[in-house]
Image: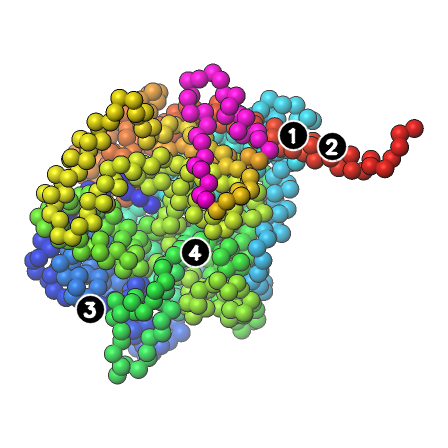
C-alpha cells in the first residue's frame, strides 16, 4: 500500500477539509461497527433476500436487485462520517475515503445489473449452468479436507526437490561453476519478493524481475512472493498472456494500461460482450448464486475491473479460461520449471468483533465506542497465503487445497453429493480485488496519508489532536468493507491452536484485504518453517519507501515466532532526532502550533551546533542495492541483539573481503538484498518511438487531467528524470500508464538493479560457498565418527 502524494487520491480535494464545520458534515451520524457489514445494519437487506426466490427473484418474477441495493447502500454509507457525534468536527475527512475510480461506477453497475438478471437464457444463467458441469469444473466432484499441520503441503515439498535440480543448472551458469561440481545440498534457496503499490508496483516490479531474468538470477530462485500490485505481476507472469516471459509482459502492460480500469466504454464492452464477459463475470455469478450469505461490495467490482484490464490481451478473442483459476498455475510448476508464486492477504482481527450483539431489537445496542472499551486487547493482522497448491494461514496452522477455495467447510470437511455440489474454485478476478484492496484501509491509514496535505488548513490543530487521541479507535475501523471468503475453519475450535481468536469461529466468512495494511513487503511467508530461505531479494516500490521501514517491521515478527537468522535492524536507518523531539515537545497539553514550530526550530538549530570532535551521524539514505545478513548465534542474555551491519556499504571499494567474511561465517543467517525504487540520474535514456494512441486511451486520458493537457501528447518522462516520491503518475492510486511511462518506470527499475548486480552475485556466491563448507565439515565429522574404534592395518 502506501501513498506519498495524494493530490488525486480521493474525489474531494484537500481544500474540502476547511469546510469541516459546515453543512451536513458537522451533524452527528449513526454509530457504526468496525466493518459496515454488521448484521444489525443490513437486517432489511437480509430480510429481502430471505423473501426472494432461489434465483434471486421476487414473487412477481422481477430481479429484486438486493446485491445492487447492497452495493449502492455501501457506497452511500462510505461517504458518511464514521462514528458518533464525537466525530462531528472531523466529518469532512470522509471525502478522502472514496477511491477516485468509483466515480465511473454508476453506469457500469446499471449495465451489469441487466446482464446479471439470472433470468432463463441470460448470460448469468449460462454461467451458472456451466458452473455445475464437472467436465468444465472437475473440482466440484472432489471432497476437500482442512489440513491441520505446520508443515509444507506434499505438493510444495515435491516441487522444492524438483526445483532444486533445475536451479543447479542455472546456478552453474550464474556463478560460472561447472555443473558437475555443484552438490544439490549446496544450492541456496533464494526468494524474490515485490512490494505493494498498485500499478506502480506492477510496472516497476516487472522491470526489476526482467533485469533479474536477463542477469541469470531469475532461474536461480525458488520462490516469489507479492503484496498488492506484485500479486498482479505474479498472476500475469503465469498467464497465457505473458507466457513466463517478462518482455511479453512489458508489451502487454504498454498495450493495456493506457485506459483507466473503470473507464465506462472500455470496461462495459469487456464485461458485457462475448467472449470476455463470460470469463470475467463467471466468478461473480458463481459467488452470487452459490454463496448467498456472502456480501458484495467495492472489492468485487474492483476485481472485475482489474481483470478486464489486465487479464484480457490486446486481441480480446485471445482471452484464456485457464488464466482465471489460481490452481491452474500448477501446470507451470511441473518439474520445477518456474518459481513457486506466493500471494498474500491479511485478516484484521479486531477484538470488538468477538462481542455478541443482542438479537432482541427492543434492547439498545452498545455503540462501537462502548464495545471497544470492553475489549482491552490490541487489534492485529493474520496473514493468509495463496499458492497454486494451498490456501494457508500459519497462525491457524491450517489450510485447504487451492481448488477448494470458495466453498464452505464444516468441522474440517467439505463433502460433495449430487444434491449438494460446491461452487467451482474462486476465480482470479475476485482474488485480484482482495490482493490489491488498499482502499479497505483503516481510518488510521487514511489519516496518515492525508495528514501532510491538510496541515496548513484552518483548524488543523484541533482536528489533529482529536484524531491522534482517537488513534486506538481509528485502527479498528474500516470505512470500506474488506471482501469475504468462506471460512474453512468453522467448527474446528478444538483442532486448532489455543492462540486462535474466538471471533474466527463465529464468522462464516474471512474478511481479507491487501496485506500492505500490515507490511508492504511479503517477508513473513518466506520465513515460514520448512521453506528454509537463505537469501531474500526484495524489490520495494512502496510510495512511502523512506518513511515506512518495512524491513524493520519484520524484527518483531521474527522475535515472536522464534525465527533464527533474521538480520535485526535491516532497512532504512532510523533518523530519530527531530521526529523524537517533536513527540517529546507534544507531550505538554494545550501547546499551540506556533509554540511547537518555534520549539522544533530551536531543536533543529541546536542539533546542528555539535562539538567539533563529535562524529557526524551516519546518513539515513540507502543505496540502490543494500545487503544485510543475520546470525543464528545463540544469545546468552535477554538484551536486544545489536542491529545487523550493512554489507558492501562502500560500493566503490574494491575490497569486499569483510562483507564476504560475514556472509560465509558458520553462524551466518538469512541474507537480505534490498532494492528500493529511488531516483537514478544515471539511468539510460530510452529512445522515443512514434506511436498511434488508441481512441479509448485518448478518451480515458481526457477524463484524467493529471496525465496531460493534450491526450495525443502524454507525459513521456525519461528513466533518469522520474522520482517515485514526487511524480503524480507514480501515485498508488493512478490507474493510467501510457506506453512511454511504462518504458520509463521499467527503465528505472532495470537501471537500479544493474547498480547492484555484482553485489547480488557476490552474495549468492558467498552463501553457496558457506553451505558447501558446512556440508563438507559435516560429512568429515560423520566420517570421523564412523572410523572411531577402527585400527588401521
Residue 355 placement (x, y as % from top left): 36, 71
State the image coordinates of residue 544 (x, y, percent, origin top left).
30, 39
Disc number placed over residue 773 in the picture, else none: 1
Tell me the SS state at disc 4: strand
Q: Quadrant of the C terminus?
A: top right
The first of marks 3 and 1 along the sequence is 3
Give residue 529's position: percent from left, percent from top: 56, 48
Q: Which mark is residue 382?
A: 4
Q: In this figure, which residue is indicated by the disc labeled 3?
A: 30
The residue at 42%/25% (across/down) is 649
As rendered, which of 206 and 111 lies closer to the eye? Answer: 206
Which one is earlier in the sequence, the residue at label 3 or at label 2? 3
In the image, residue 165 above or below residue 78 = above
Disc number lying in front (3 or 1): 1
Q: Is residue 484 visible?
A: yes
Q: Which residue is mark 2?
A: 780
Residue 259 against residue 688 in the figure, above or below = below
Which residue range is magenta in the image? 639-666
Q: Quadrant of the N terminus?
A: top left
Q: CA distance from mark 3 to mark 1?
A: 66 Å
Estimate the x, y position of residue 679 in percent, counting from the top left.
31, 28
Where 582 sits versus 88, above or below?
above
Categorize mark 1 by other alpha carbons within 10 Å: few (<14), some (14-19), many (20+).
some
Between 613 and 264, the residue placed more toward the observer is 613
The disc, 1 or 4, on the residue closer to the chain's N-terminal end is 4
Which marked residue is nearer to the observer: mark 3 or mark 2? Answer: 2
Amino acid at each position: 500500500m502506501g501513498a506519498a502524494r495524494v493530490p488525486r487520491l480521493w474525489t474531494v480535494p484537500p481544500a474540502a477539509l476547511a469546510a469541516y464545520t459546515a453543512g451536513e458534515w458537522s451533524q452527528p451520524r449513526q454509530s457504526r461497527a468496525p466493518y459496515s457489514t454488521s448484521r444489525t445494519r443490513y437486517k432489511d437487506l437480509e430480510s429481502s433476500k430471505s423473501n426472494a426466490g432461489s434465483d434471486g427473484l421476487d414473487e412477481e418474477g422481477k430481479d429484486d436487485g438486493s446485491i445492487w441495493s447492497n452495493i449502492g447502500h455501501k457506497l452511500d454509507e462510505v461517504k458518511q462520517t464514521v462514528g458518533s457525534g464525537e466525530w462531528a468536527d472531523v466529518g469532512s475527512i470522509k471525502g478522502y475515503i472514496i477511491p477516485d475510480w468509483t466515480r465511473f461506477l454508476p453506469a457500469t453497475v446499471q449495465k451489469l445489473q441487466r446482464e446479471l438478471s439470472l433470468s432463463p437464457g441470460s448470460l448469468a444463467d449460462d454461467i451458472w449452468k456451466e458452473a455445475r458441469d464437472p467436465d468444465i469444473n472437475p473440482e466440484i466432484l472432489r471432497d476437500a479436507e482442512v489440513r491441520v499441520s505446520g508443515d509444507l503441503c506434499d505438493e510444495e515439498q515435491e516441487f522444492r526437490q524438483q526445483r532444486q535440480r533445475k536451479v543447479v543448472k542455472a546456478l552453474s551458469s550464474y556463478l560460472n561453476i561447472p555443473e558437475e561440481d555443484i552438490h544439490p545440498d549446496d544450492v541456496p534457496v533464494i526468494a524474490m519478493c515485490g512490494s505493494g503499490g498498485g500499478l506502480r508496483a506492477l510496472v516497476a516490479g516487472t522491470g526489476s524481475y526482467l533485469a533479474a531474468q536477463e542477469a541469470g538470477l531469475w532461474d536461480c530462485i525458488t520462490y516469489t512472493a507479492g503484496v498488492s500490485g506484485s500479486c498482479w505481476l505474479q498472476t500475469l507472469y503465469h498467464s497465457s498472456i505473458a507466457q513466463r516471459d517478462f518482455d511479453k509482459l512489458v508489451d502487454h502492460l504498454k498495450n493495456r494500461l493506457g485506459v483507466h480500469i473503470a473507464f465506462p466504454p472500455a470496461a462495459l464492452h469487456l464485461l458485457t460482450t462475448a467472449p470476455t464477459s463470460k470469463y470475467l463475470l463467471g466468478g461473480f455469478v458463481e459467488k452470487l448464486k452459490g454463496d448467498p450469505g456472502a456480501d458484495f461490495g467495492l472489492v468485487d467490482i474492483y476485481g472485475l475491473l482489474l481483470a478486464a484490464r489486465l487479464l484480457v490481451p490486446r486481441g480480446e478473442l485471445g482471452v484464456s479460461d485457464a488464466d482465471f483459476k489460481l490452481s491452474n498455475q500448477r501446470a507451470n510448476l511441473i518439474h520445477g520449471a518456474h518459481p513457486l508464486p506466493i500471494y498474500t492477504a491479511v485478516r484484521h482481527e479486531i477484538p470488538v468483533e468477538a462481542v455478541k450483539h443482542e438479537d432482541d431489537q427492543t434492547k439498545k445496542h452498545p455503540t462501537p465506542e462502548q464495545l471497544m472499551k470492553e475489549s482491552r486487547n490490541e487489534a492485529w493482522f493474520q496473514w493468509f497465503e495463496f499458492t497454486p497448491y494451498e490456501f494457508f494461514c500459519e497462525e491457524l496452522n491450517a489450510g485447504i487445497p487451492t481448488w477448494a477455495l470458495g466453498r464452505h467447510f464444516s468441522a474440517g470437511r467439505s463433502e460433495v453429493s449430487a444434491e449438494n455440489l460446491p461452487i467451482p474454485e474462486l476465480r482470479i478476478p475476485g482474488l485480484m480485488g482482495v490482493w490489491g484492496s488498499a482502499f479497505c484501509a483503516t481510518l488510521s491509514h487514511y489519516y496518515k496519508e492525508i495528514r501532510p496535505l491538510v496541515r496548513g488548513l484552518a483548524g488543523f490543530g484541533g482536528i489533529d489532536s482529536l484524531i491522534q487521541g482517537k488513534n486506538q479507535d481509528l485502527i479498528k475501523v474500516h470505512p470500506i468493507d474488506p471482501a469475504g471468503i468462506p471460512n474453512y475453519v468453522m467448527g474446528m475450535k478444538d483442532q486448532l491452536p489455543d492462540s486462535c481468536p474466538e471471533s474466527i469461529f463465529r464468522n462464516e466468512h474471512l474478511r481479507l484485504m491487501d496485506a500492505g495494511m500490515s507490511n508492504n513487503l511479503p517477508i513473513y511467508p518466506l520465513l515460514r518453517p520448512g521453506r528454509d530461505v537463505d537469501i531474500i531479494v526484495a524489490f520495494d516500490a512502496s510510495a512511502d519507501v523512506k518513511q515506512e521501514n518495512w524491513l524493520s517491521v519484520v524484527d518483531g515478527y521474527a522475535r515472536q515466532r522464534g525465527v533464527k537468522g533474521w538480520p535485526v535492524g535491516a532497512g532504512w536507518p532510523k533518523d530519530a532526532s527531530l521526529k523524537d523531539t517533536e513527540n517529546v515537545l507534544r507531550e505538554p497539553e494545550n501547546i499551540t502550533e506556533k509554540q511547537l514550530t518555534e520549539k522544533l526550530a530551536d531543536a533543529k538549530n541546536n542539533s546542528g551546533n555539535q562539538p567539533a570532535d563529535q562524529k557526524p551521524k551516519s546518513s539515513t539514505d540507502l543505496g540502490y542495492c543494500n545487503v544485510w545478513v543475520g546470525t543464528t548465534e545463540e544469545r546468552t542474555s535477554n538484551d536486544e541483539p545489536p542491529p545487523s551491519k550493512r554489507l558492501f556499504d562502500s560500493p566503490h571499494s574494491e575490497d569486499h573481503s569483510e562483507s564476504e567474511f560475514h556472509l560465509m561465517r558458520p553462524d551466518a543467517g538469512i541474507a537480505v538484498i534490498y532494492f528500493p525504487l529511488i531516483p537514478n540520474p544515471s539511468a539510460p535514456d530510452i529512445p522515443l518511438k512514434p506511436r498511434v494512441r488508441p481512441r479509448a486511451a485518448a478518451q480515458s486520458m481526457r477524463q484524467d487531467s493529471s496525465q496531460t493537457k493534450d491526450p495525443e501528447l502524454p507525459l513521456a518522462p525519461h528513466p533518469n528524470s522520474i522520482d517515485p516520491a514526487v511524480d503524480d503518475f507514480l501515485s498508488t492510486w493512478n490507474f493510467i500508464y501510457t506506453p512511454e511511462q511504462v518504458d520509463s518506470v521499467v527503465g528505472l527499475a532495470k537501471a537500479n538493479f544493474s547498480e547492484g548486480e555484482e553485489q547480488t552475485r557476490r552474495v549468492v556466491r558467498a552463501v553457496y560457498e558457506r553451505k558447501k563448507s558446512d556440508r563438507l565439515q559435516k560429512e568429515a565429522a560423520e566420517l570421523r565418527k564412523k572410523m572411531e574404534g577402527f585400527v588401521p592395518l
